Image (cartoon, rainbow, N blue to C red):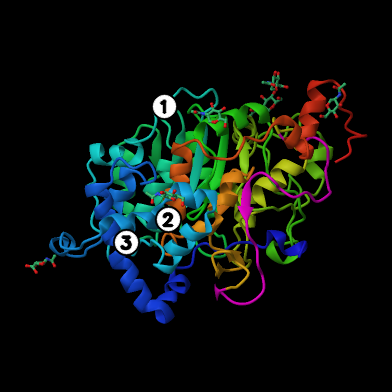
Amino acid sequence: MKKTRYKRLTDLDDDVDTNRRHDFNSMCSALAGFLLLFAFVACMIFLTSVESIPSTYLLSTLVSKQNKTKQKKRPAFRDESQFLNCSALIKGDKNTIELYVNNGRMKLDKERLFDLPMDCASIRERVYGDMPPFRPLNRPIAFVRTVYNLYELQEALLSISFHPDNVFCYVMDSKSSDKLKSDMRTMGKCFDNVLVLEKEYSLNSGGHGQDPAHFDCLEQILPRRWHHAVIIQNFDLIIKSPQQLSDLSETLNYTSIMGFDFGFKYRYNSKADWTPRGLKLFKNETGVPSQILTKKLRVRKSLNEVIMSKVFVKSIFEKLNLKTIVKLFDDNDYYGVDEMLVQTLYENYLGLDGQMESNCIKNHDDSLSRMTHWDWSGPNGFDKDCHSKWKRHGICILGVEYLNELSKSQKVMANKVMSSFDFGTIICTREMMKTNQTSTTPDAKWLSSFPQFREMQMKANGTYNRDKFDC
Ligand SMILES: *[C@@H]1O[C@H](CO)[C@@H](O)[C@H](O)[C@H]1NC(C)=O
Ligand SMILES: *[C@@H]1O[C@H](CO)[C@@H](O)[C@H](O)[C@H]1NC(C)=O
Ligand SMILES: *[C@@H]1O[C@H](CO)[C@@H](O)[C@H](O)[C@H]1NC(C)=O
Ligand SMILES: *[C@@H]1O[C@H](CO)[C@@H](O)[C@H](O)[C@H]1NC(C)=O
Ligand SMILES: *[C@@H]1O[C@H](CO)[C@@H](O)[C@H](O)[C@H]1NC(C)=O
Ligand SMILES: *[C@@H]1O[C@H](CO)[C@@H](O)[C@H](O)[C@H]1NC(C)=O
């Protein structure tokens, strides 16, 4: 299992396999659809002041194309509100979870969504209208996300981390629907701190296009004020609040967070010239020690999700020419290509600011970036070992059963949430932010399990010795 820990995700398939649930559960789903639909309207009409009823965000998002005139006739709305009792779900209350699940999870069905009002006032109202007032952040965060489906999901995910000091950069898959593209662009125009790149990339389940897309975004937002960038994909959920991430960034200082593992030989071209000179990696080789220029890079890997310090990102763009190395990793002959570039640049000493200086060739888990419930046995679909009983490509989908764990996890992100499986998880995570129920922020003591963090601490306290560093 150790080796498969970092087996890559294939986020980019369509939602076909989760939708298959409808086959054996279609009656239940249909019923649930109605119940939930009514529940939302009910919340709006009768229960807007009840603490456990989620935000206006939910209410305005989840109205489907059912006939509104029929809804009014339905009695007993009040009872149905308990289907999304976030405070109970976050506490892990078994009865509440059971009730919600047995009545069909809340799902976004792209065929049945009402068009959302897309004027800026409405968008802003949905994203942060009901959130507590913002306090300035010492260390704003950049969120760099590749997206390919469902605008409604992306808007909800934005609202989880939205803060006027943070920066959000999106790159879209060129195969995305016209609706996603136009809605994302409309949304981007409503916020100074949201960028939707003009250029679109062809993203696929092999991870192709991710590195070029993420680095394109990073370059675009470089002049802006942020201290760490969180690199994410379509289905990643952020589980720490903007304030917590700012605090975390302060503790991390210039450290970046990722795992340490060796790249698998079958995922990159091991025959290529991996010396920085061969890769034409340095913009200017004058002054770069030949030891660095001629030493083959060891290909390293962890996950696509990493946390990069601005210091490191800035140094990469200042000193390096990424064209060749990005192309080499993004090779169409290989699969799972998007979790090696950052790691290889960080873990081979190249004289970059903010990078690891010690050559740390051991393997280390990344216990901070991403929470994942791996389960490699069996096919996609039903899986008894997942708390949500549903799995995709070796990863349990985060249904509301995981909310309690999310609220206690030290991690920054979780993978994966799917709005076609359980949108309740996303809404209740937002509620978790809003009501300050997220887990504690990792402190320096906890972070010192990371070799890069220890290295930084030792440099700061004057005890660092490159040759003796024990990673
Ligand atoms: C809603 O129902 C009314 C009356 O049954 C009907 O006239 C109307 O066309 C329906 N609207 C939609 C959008 O289905
Ligand atoms: C939510 O669940 C808790 C615990 O089960 C319960 O006390 C509370 O009344 C519920 N709230 C609503 C609105 O159903
Ligand atoms: C961050 O690191 C730099 C460089 O070592 C150091 O000068 C600075 O004091 C550190 N900041 C904090 C808050 O530790
Ligand atoms: C390359 O770096 C050297 C040493 O830092 C510097 O003197 C030189 O001007 C640089 N060349 C270019 C083209 O920037
Ligand atoms: C959130 O809770 C933590 C402790 O649990 C507290 O230190 C912090 O001030 C709270 N934040 C807000 C905005 O209430
Ligand atoms: C310096 O930092 C390292 C890494 O955290 C720690 O193990 C060591 O005890 C510190 N040394 C001093 C003298 O503070």
Ligand 5 contact, mark 1 (Cβ < 8 Å): no
Cβ atoms under marks 2 and 3 closer than 8 Å: no
The residue singled out by tag 2 in the image is: 424
The residue singled out by tag 1 in the image is: 134
Q: Is residue 421 magenta?
A: no
Q: Nearer the viewer, residue 287 or 81?
A: 81
* For marks 1 and 2 on the same chain, the one whose residue lies earlier in the sequence: 1
Name the mark on residue 36.
3
The span from disc 2 to disc 3 (Cα, nearest Å) is: 11 Å
Cβ atoms under marks 1 and 2 closer than 8 Å: no
Q: Quadrant of residue 376?
A: bottom right
**First to last magenta residue range:** 355-382
* Residue drawn 22% across the image and 41% down it: 119
Q: Position of residue 200 (x, y in %)?
A: 41, 53
In the displayed structure, 131 sits above or below 225; it is below
Instruction: For residue 280, say whether it is visible.
Output: no
The span from disc 3 to disc 1 (Cα, nearest Å) is: 31 Å
Q: How dense is the environment of label 1, judged by Cα within 10 Å: few (below 14), some, or many (20 and up)? A: few
Q: Nearer the viewer, residue 296 or 103?
A: 103
User: Which of the two marks, 2 or 3, is nearer to us in this view?
Assistant: 3
Q: How dense is the environment of label 3, judged by Cα within 10 Å: few (below 14), some, or many (20 and up)? A: many
Element at label 3: helix
Instruction: For residue 464, say whether it is visible.
Output: yes
* Residue drawn 60% across the image and 54% down it: 327
- Classified by dominant secondary structure, the portion drawn in magenta counts as loop
Say whether residue 93 is left or right of residue 184.
right
Element at label 2: helix
Q: Amino acid at mark 1?
A: Phe
* For marks 2 and 3 on the same chain, the one whose residue lies earlier in the sequence: 3
Say whether residue 85 is left or right of residue 7.
left
The span from disc 1 to disc 2 (Cα, nearest Å) is: 25 Å
